């Protein structure tokens, strides 16, 4: 027992099963780690001889390794083994008879979470003055001279009495018939800024609009969810004017039914660009001879995904039939592409910007730089406007601990706080599907039966939903509406939900994978703190990605740090991760070692679920591969921060519930044919721009491509299909 009493134990270290004898441990120091890495049980003498000749030893200790105070070895073993068995539903392991005749549970491999992690650097950032926009004004809609029924609808149906700043500046200019370029923060009321003038002008026409006249207004939006949201807003405004018919065209629906609606007549048409181009080319009864309004919402998002050609096709089709119309461009960020689109579509526009920097000045800078040939398509403004009541946070987490840190954060917000509504952003559809099913089976599966001391109502607050481009349109619509109407829950999604969506009462935005640009960061966090409400955001970065904070600061974005230990400390409040107490011993005070032990229990539960079958292991590997592929697509100006060579594959594998780094990411675990055992060259230069454009475009496609049926076909078992990543 002298060896055990003098041992400094970290809970993340590998341990030796009881009953194995002291002599063997003294004779072969460090062999337990090698055994566990090979997955070989410690049973026979032949096994001893095999490891006796092995040259592989334990990994060298690093300076930043976290050591823990001495603890009882057997107690830690019992705690970790006992808790992991009860966290997830799995097959019971048979009992093992030891040398002294006692029956004990078999050896369970635990995870080394707190060893050999990179040192977490201090975040040194210069405080910058963020651009703030005043959301509401004291002016009322009554001052605009609108139709009384329209004012009543805004007040009673939309529950709005005073205008926002962007509405105050935009609506009068639009009612005068001017072309307008609007730049305003996300969540500032831009949708109503153009919807109200459109409805007001159409209902006031001398000759009453007939449904068979066709479209008088065309609204282009980048995503299907935003199309549905805009359609819903216009529907509410048109309640007193039922002779004006709105309609929506988007991917995921049958072209035949959309043709029937076009044949009957749509006066206000909301559409995604790809779907509208498809109808322009294939539907004869669509015409734009009476178009009076052309609105392009989220113009920067439409353009930066490569839809500029589609916009050109649409503009040419409209110009060939009707040149006299009113044009509106709206965007939360002003890019070179938006400026170019404004040049070809707007006539003597009024530029509106609510932030400290005026839109006219920004346009002049972009035009001058483009004429001089010094502006690239990736150019971005120096600063972005953020909601005034939004608190932004960042946390630095080693790759090994990203999964348990995310889980602890979600548990802390939803189980122990009331009315929490969170959105978690991932970089690909595979990641959304993987973590959705992982959390359902591990976190939600046991919350139905709360442990003693935990309130029964806490379990009902933990509700997971998912949203990404590989889902069927009917399911996407259902999820979007369910999350919009719910008062709490967690939505795991890709950037398909990052633009323009108005999801009420969202309290937290979590970015598990860092966005590819500060502009995308602004759009993600814009899903909370909308229309003057309070909200918070959390960006999770690896220690090697800490420089990204300075990149945000260069665009006048301030973030405050939250320590990883503070997030993990919430596990002390959850009895499911409590150390097993034997007899009637009182629980000891929760300290750093107890927190690490509970984090290890949670991580081991994730790993046990993933390794329960070869199919799940293969699934986790494909999700990991999707993450690496997305990681390789960061733009050139961020490559020094996000580079695949900076990833530790073994540590990253831990965040997918894998115990070891996969040797072959291309081959599934069940396929042993040597012809497919080829290790991917992660450092090989790919066809980045063309490949990335095709990947991203598919998320917002028209839904009519030949490969859509295959991409959107769901697995029979409800698991995600193994197709190319989409962001």
Image (cartoon, rainbow, N blue to C red):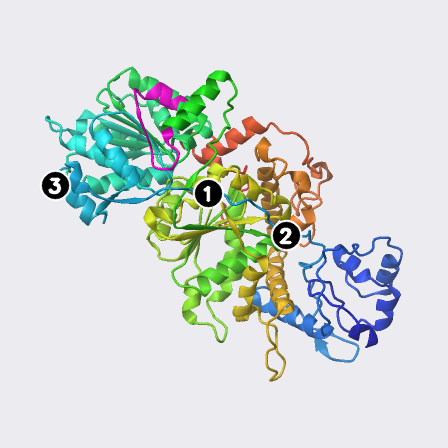
- What residue is shown at x 45% (from left), y 25% (from top)? 336
The circle on residue 148 is 3
Residue 345 on the magenta segment:
yes
Q: State the image coordinates of residue 210 (x, y, percent, origin top left).
A: 15, 28
Judged by depth in the image, the label closer to the viewer, 3 or 1, is 1
Q: Furthest residue to the bottom?
A: 584
Vertical side of 30 occupied by 358: above or below: above
| Between discs 3 and 2, the one toward the N terminus | 3
| Callout 1: SS | loop
| Callout 3: SS | helix
Which image quadrant for residue 190?
A: top left
Tell me if 640 is positioned left or right of 217 in this view.
Answer: right
Residue designated by label 1: 129
- What residue is shown at x 79% (from left), y 64% (from top)? 42
Judged by depth in the image, the label closer to the viewer, 2 or 1, is 1
Q: State the image coordinates of residue 637 (x, y, percent, origin top left).
A: 58, 32
| Between discs 2 and 1, the one toward the N terminus | 1
Q: State the image coordinates of residue 91 (x, y, percent, origin top left).
A: 60, 65
- Please state which of residues 543 and 233 is positioned toward the viewer in this rendering: 543
Residue 547 on the magenta segment:
no
Which image quadrant for residue 500?
A: top left
């Amino acid at each position: 027992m002298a060896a055990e009493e003098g041992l400094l134990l970290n809970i993340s270290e590998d341990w030796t099963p009881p009953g194995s004898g002291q002599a063997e441990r003294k004779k072969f120091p460090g062999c337990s780690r090698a055994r566990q890495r090979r997955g070989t049980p410690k049973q026979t003498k032949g096994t001893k001889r095999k490891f006796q000749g092995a040259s592989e030893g334990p990994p060298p200790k690093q300076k930043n390794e976290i050591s823990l105070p001495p603890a009882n070895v057997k107690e830690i073993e019992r705690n970790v083994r006992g808790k992991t068995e009860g966290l997830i539903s799995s097959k019971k392991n048979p009992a093992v008879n030891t040398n002294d005749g006692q029956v004990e549970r078999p050896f369970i491999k635990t995870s080394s979470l707190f060893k050999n992690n990179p040192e977490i650097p201090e975040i040194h950032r210069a405080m910058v003055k963020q651009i703030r926009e005043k959301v509401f004004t004291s002016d009322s809609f009554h001052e605009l001279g609108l139709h009384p029924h329209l004012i009543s609808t805004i007040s009673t149906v939309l529950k709005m009495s005073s205008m926002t700043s962007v509405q105050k500046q935009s609506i009068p200019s639009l009612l005068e018939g001017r072309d307008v370029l609007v730049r305003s923060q996300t969540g500032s009321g831009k949708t109503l800024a153009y919807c109200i003038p459109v409805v007001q002008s159409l209902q006031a026409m001398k000759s009453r609009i007939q449904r068979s006249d066709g479209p008088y207004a065309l609204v282009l939006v980048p995503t299907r969810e935003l199309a549905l949201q805009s359609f819903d807003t216009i529907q509410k405004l048109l309640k007193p004017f039922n002779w004006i018919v709105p309609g929506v065209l988007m991917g995921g629906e049958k072209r035949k039914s959309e043709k029937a609606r076009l044949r009957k007549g749509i006066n206000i048409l909301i559409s995604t660009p790809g779907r509208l181009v498809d109808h322009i080319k294939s539907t004869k009864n669509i015409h734009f001879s009476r178009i009076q309004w052309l609105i392009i919402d989220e113009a920067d998002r439409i353009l930066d995904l490569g839809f500029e050609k589609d916009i050109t096709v649409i503009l040419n089709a409209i110009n060939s039939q009707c040149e006299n119309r009113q044009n509106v461009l709206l965007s939360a960020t002003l890019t070179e592409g938006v400026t170019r689109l404004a040049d070809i579509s707007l006539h003597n526009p009024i530029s509106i910007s609510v932030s400290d920097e005026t839109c006219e000045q920004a346009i002049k800078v972009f035009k001058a730089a483009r004429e001089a040939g010094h502006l690239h398509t990736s150019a971005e403004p120096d600063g972005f406007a953020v909601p005034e009541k939004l608190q932004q946070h960042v946390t630095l987490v080693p790759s090994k601990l990203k999964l348990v840190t995310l889980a602890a954060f979600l548990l802390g917000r939803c189980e122990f706080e009331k009315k929490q509504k969170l959105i978690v952003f991932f970089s690909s559809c595979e990641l959304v599907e993987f973590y959705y099913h992982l959390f359902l089976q591990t976190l939600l599966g046991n919350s139905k039966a709360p442990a003693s001391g935990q309130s029964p109502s806490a379990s009902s607050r933990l509700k997971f939903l998912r949203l990404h481009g590989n889902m069927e349109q009917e399911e996407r619509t259902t999820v979007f509406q369910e999350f919009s109407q719910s008062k709490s829950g967690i939505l795991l999604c890709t950037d398909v939900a990052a633009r323009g969506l108005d999801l009420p009462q969202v309290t937290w935005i979590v970015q598990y994978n860092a966005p590819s640009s500060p502009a995308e960061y602004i759009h993600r966090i814009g899903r909370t703190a909308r229309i003057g409400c309070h909200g918070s955001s959390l960006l999770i970065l690896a220690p090697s990605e800490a420089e990204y904070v300075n990149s945000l600061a260069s665009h006048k974005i301030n973030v405050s740090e939250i320590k990883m230990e503070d997030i993990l400390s919430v596990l002390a409040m959850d009895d499911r991760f409590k150390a097993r107490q034997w007899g009637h011993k009182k629980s000891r005070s929760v300290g750093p070692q107890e927190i690490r032990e509970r984090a290890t229990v949670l991580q081991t539960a994730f790993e046990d679920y993933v390794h329960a079958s070869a199919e799940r292991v293969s699934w986790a590997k494909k999700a990991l591969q999707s993450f690496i592929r997305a990681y390789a697509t960061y733009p050139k100006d961020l490559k020094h921060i996000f580079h695949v060579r900076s990833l530790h594959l073994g540590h990253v594998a831990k965040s997918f519930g894998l115990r070891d780094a996969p040797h072959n990411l291309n081959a599934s675990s069940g396929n042993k044919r040597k012809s497919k055992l080829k290790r991917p060259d992660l450092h090989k230069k790919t066809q980045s721009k063309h490949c990335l454009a095709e990947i991203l475009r598919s998320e917002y496609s028209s839904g009519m491509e030949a490969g859509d049926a295959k991409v959107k076909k769901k697995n029979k078992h409800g698991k995600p299909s193994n197709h190319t990543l989409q962001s």
